[in-house]
Amino acid sequence: MDDILLEVQNLRTHFMLDEGVVKAVDGADIQVRHGRTLAIVGESGCGKSVMARSILQIVPQPGRIVDGRIVFHLPETDARKRETIVITDLDPNSPRMRAIRGRDISMIFQEPMSSLSPVHTIGSQVAENFRLHWPVSKKEARDVTIEMLRKVGIPRAEQRFDAYPHQLSGGMRQRAMIAMALICQPSLLIADEPTTALDVTTQAQILELMQQLQQELGMAIVIITHDLGVVAEIADDVAVMYLGEVVEQAPVDDIFHNPQHPYTRALLRSVPRLEGETHERLDTIPGAVPHPFARPVACRFHPRCRERLIHRLAMCKEEAPSLLPIGSDHLVRCWLHQATIESANDRTREPLRVD
Amino acid sequence: MAEQAPLLDVRNLKMHFPIRRGLLRRVVGRVQAVDDVSFSIRPGETLSLVGESGCGKTTIGRCLVRVYKPSGGEILFNPPDSQPVDLARLKRNAVKPWRKSIQMVFQDPMSSLNPRMNVLQIVGEPLLVNGIAKGKEIEDRVAMLLRKVGLSPDYMRRYPHAFSGGQRQRIGIARALSVNPSLVVADEAVSALDVSVQAQILNLMQDLQQELNLTYLFVAHNLSVVRYISDRVAVMYVGKLVELTDTKRLFTTPKHPYTEALLANVPKPDPRLRSQRIVLQGEVADPANPPSGCYFHPRCQYARDRCKIERPALREVAPGHSVACHFAEELTLRGVVAA
């Protein structure tokens, strides 16, 4: 498969706490294609941010990648040949890993104020990333930085080079973050809730900027978000996560118009829409996301799943389903579909037992 | 709807914050957080205040519960069982008897609940402070309130950390309702919640409104949420109201270019609607140093010369539809097409 840039296979990132083990990511798989945008969506606690941090091996203590593989297929450029790197085999502090971070894979975060240093100028922070990876003089780095600041739409870039983060608005700070992330022209940009802290009009500007830069620079984007509106705006492919697993992955149109996992469907139904009616009731998902120490066994969504009751599948509480294809690009982790795939296996359909 | 006397009538409300500089803390400027805002809320209705950060929507909410003393204007509060009162002019200690009539639900359910108090203490405190109940009676009342917001009274002796975000927001609502308020100011009450939980809390707030005949002032930035809960919507931009009308009209036939842009910029949860974006250039104006004329003119695609000089007043362009734009009648603006 030539167009795959990044593969995450059966990733498990756990946090070893005194109270027990929090399995933030527990058996997740995703694939990112060259030049495309993959959105990872899910509610708080589903492990989407930990998954993003695992890709860069910057999982905070006491978290650790305990299992799985992250394979990065570095594309061919003028300077070097195509190369396959198994990120999970690298030591997080090794020079090799540090060479990848910021140059081949870079990341932008939700809150630009807390991810920029308040005591350094915008320009020096953006230029630092460039000088770390390329042997250039300060002057050259400054020129490249100003060019990049201009590209992300910061007006009067020469003056803003010497501005401090508190002198910029939230939208401008997020633009500076993007400049910092893209200055080495990475092949993958990971954006963790990049617009959540911004107002709608600024959010629209940033989303448009990301799309325009993607076309210009040809990088792939992994965007982590809980906002299905943002997903619909920007994504090519979508992975829906629930409690540390990917439950469905498909092209964006399929996710919104032909969702197959009961969780995806329920999530879509509970989104308030601009075309709604006043005092109309929204559909809800019963219950709440379970506590990390009290994860349901077998299918992790089964206690909140309405479709399980309708279809009377006993299997859901007994065994975990696996992520299986139901179409060319459409993967689903649900017994409902596996029941149809393996329809020969009658064991999956049992009379409903009330517990 | 028959014209009812408004429960709350806000007239020309102003809230200016001084900017102080230097050793002597001299006043060097003013932030006009809320500038000459008027609106009213009828009993039993939900009015939403929407706008981007810094537009003054939260400041209005805080003026109503008198966290701030407004710099000018009137807040006429007219509860069903007593004489009307102007909350804006009352002295700090004279406000106290009215505090239980106007209650607030906050955005962040973690920081608005004291982590050292259990649910019984959190929800029971307003009852105790206002002398509504004491002793064993408090416990019964709290149990009833918790049941009303969909929590089990068995959890009464637990602390906030033991609850999820949605449950904590339910506790915050129970606390607000404990003193039987007639007006509830909900400041971004569902913004910090996940979508599935957000839907639960929105439904709960609507049920409680019907059951207890509550009036809501709903402060929010998310227009899709506003559509579900409000009867009327007021759009704010840099401390001023720019449009005020009933929900359906605002969404389908907006008359102010800023409202149109806000609606167009909400990301729609449907990839097939992608192309309909109008990206607004520039940024929200600084309330300490607003532009001349219409505050929105530097970002407005319909702006003409008049907009740079003359500030448009909020005026009624159709019955029940007020807009602050010189060209409200001429412009044909795009709203949301009903599904």
Image (tube, grey):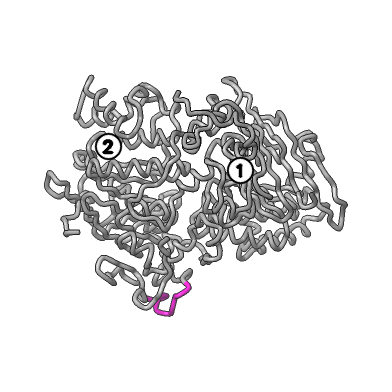
**Residue B15: percent from the left, percent from the top?**
32, 55
Q: Name the residue at the bottom extreme.
A: B305
Q: Which residue is mark 1?
A: A248
Q: Residue at x 78, y 59 (%)?
A: A140
Quarter of the image with the C terminus of chain A in it:
top left
Q: Which mark is residue A58?
A: none
Magenta run includes residue B302: yes
Magenta run includes residue B287: no
Question: In what element is the residue under mark 2?
Answer: helix
Q: Comparing marks 2 and 1, which lies closer to the viewer? A: 1
Q: Residue at x 41, y 64 (%)?
A: B259
Q: Is residue A183 above or below residue A57?
A: below
Q: Residues within 10 Å of mark 2 (few under 14, many from 20)?
A: many
Q: Which residue is mark 2?
A: B177
Q: Please provide the residue range marked out in magenta.
A: B301-310
Q: Residue at x 68, y 59 (%)?
A: A214
**Residue B292: percent from the left, percent from the top?**
41, 71
Q: Residues within 10 Å of mark 1 (few under 14, many from 20)?
A: many
Given the image, on which type of amino acid does mark 1 rest? Glu
Q: Quadrant of residue B333?
A: bottom left
